[in-house]
Image (cartoon, grey):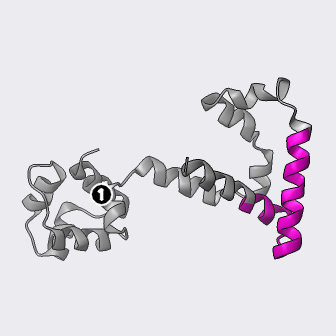
Amino acid sequence: MQLGTNLFKARKKSGLSQEEVAAKLGVSRQTISKWELDETLPDIRQAKKLAGLYHLTLDELIDFDTDLEEIQQAIHSISEEKQKKVDWTAVWGKQYPVLTTYQKTVDTASYAARLHQLLEDLQARYGYNDLDAMLVLKDILGHTWNKK
């Protein structure tokens, strides 16, 4: 995605017009338009001001992804009760079919027993409740995977 598109989407999400942004930054509306059309780039000071105006970090502004932000907001806004009703295996299985088929070939009981021991260890050592222990274990697995 181009920076101009990111600037446009962030501005729209903030509910500001090009004129309003221009006034706040002390530039012309045409300057804002040129930035959003990738005809020119804001200098680093102006980019930092834009990020602040849009309540984003500079990194977030550069990598602004409204779809990702909307997904994160949707997950945050879903109640725990509704989350429990979601068949996450089926949902993720559409993207990763192995999640819907591995139970037929993998000895899940032996893995489950070892995972249960790890969960109990996290609870005993650190006082985590069931959910927190599972989340910590999941996060450790994710970090381990990412370091591969």
Where residue 39 appears, x then y in whole percent? Answer: 9, 49
Q: Is residue 53 left or right of residue 68?
A: left
Name the foreground residue: 131 vs 125.
125
Name the foreground residue: 55 vs 14.
55
Q: Is residue 138 above or below residue 123?
A: above
Q: Is residue 131 left or right of residue 32?
A: right
Start-end of magenta stretch = 110-136
Q: How many marks?
A: 1
Where does the N terminus fall, quadrant-wise? top left
At x 41% / y 51%, what residue is drawn?
66
Q: Decide: few, some or many residues near mark 1? Use Cα within 10 Å; few <14, some 14-19, many ≥20.
A: some
Element marked by disc 1: helix
Where residue 124 appears, x then y in whole percent? Answer: 89, 71
Name the foreground residue: 16 vs 86.
86
Q: Main secondary structure of the magenta part?
A: helix
Q: Is residue 20 left or right of residue 108?
A: left
Within the image, what quadrant is residue 17 found in? bottom left
Give the residue type at disc 1.
Ile
Asked if residue 85 lies in the magenta stretch, the reply is no
Where residue 22 appears, x then y in whole percent? Answer: 15, 68
Where is mark 1, residue-wise? Answer: 62
Q: Is residue 54 above or below residue 87?
A: below
At x 76% / y 25%, what residue is drawn?
101
Where residue 81 appears, x then y in whole percent? Answer: 79, 55
At x 75% / y 28%, what residue is drawn?
100
Q: Is residue 51 left or right of residue 25?
A: right
Asked if residue 114 lies in the magenta stretch, the reply is yes
